[in-house]
Amino acid sequence: MQSIGTFLVFVFFFCISFGSVQATAPFSTGEKLTYSLKWGFLPVGSATMEVLPRKLVDGESCHVFRFNVQTNSFADAFYKVRTTIESIVDKDFNKTLFYQKNQSEGNTRRDIKVEFDYQAMKCYYYQGVEKQSEVSIPEKVFDPLSIAYLFRFNKLSPNFQMTLPTCDGRKFKEIIVKTGKRERISVPAGKFWAYGTVPEMQNLRGVFKKSPDGILCVWYSDDAMRIPVKISSKVVVGSFTATLVEAIGLAR
């Protein structure tokens, strides 16, 4: 169960941007997606994704997103998770400006902040007030949370692949993701036509290092909003599933 919060965040947000981009955002302030989480057949917690009110950064009205994951009372007895992540993206959705994570997982407590300096082409990783590391970045890069929303700007199509530059403050990665077939997915929130998206596992780190044969798939609804409706993975620590329970404040 080590770093389960980090793993849950990753499986939600590995997908990439590709295809034909629509002009208007497929989400709006007030959107909230709620998921139920299971390890195997056992319910272990819940997660939410939210679009928060915009924030002024250097005079620009920027996008703000929040992800929260928490275990239930059953899982708390083994490994309690209460982790929150926030991301700020520039007004034109070209790059991440700031990323932070308040991590509480088991005995681990971390207050992480990541600053993106595009003039210096550097990304700085802080724990508390202390800078832990820095990494070189390209002109445009996205954090693990914002790429989930970036993906939703694009029309889906089968059998396509693309690469997206991603940085969590410690490592820069170019993640290659492929789309699969269109299929009918049933979750507590309803039935959806959706496309499954799968990353190339050799590009991933963390829990997947010990799972060379691991499987990870996220299904995005085949509609104008393209919301993630289901996440499924199978790795060395077991199988994980997240399913959409409720979606409110959607941009229709």
Image (tube, rainbow, N blue to C red):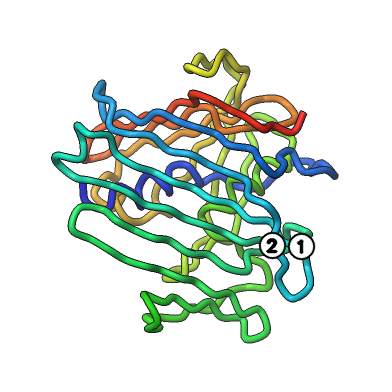
The residue that disc 2 covers is: 55
User: Mark 1: which amino acid?
Assistant: Ser
Tell me which residue sits at (43%, 43%) in the image.
11
Of residues 71 and 122, which is closer to you in this image? Answer: 71
Decide: is 33 above or below 105: above
Residue 25, image x, y percentages: 77, 43
Tell me which residue sits at (55%, 44%) in the image.
15
User: Which residue of the protein is positioned furthest toward the right in this rendering?
Assistant: 23
Toward which corner of the image does residue 103 lie, by quadrant? bottom left
User: Mark 2: which amino acid?
Assistant: Lys
User: SS for tag 2?
Assistant: strand
Residue 66, image x, y percentages: 53, 50
The residue that disc 1 covers is: 61
Q: Quadrant of the C terminus?
A: top right
Q: Quadrant of the N terminus?
A: top left
Q: What crowding class fits label 2: few (fewer than 14 Cα within 10 Å), some (14-19), or many (20 or more)? A: some
Q: Which mark is residue 245?
A: none
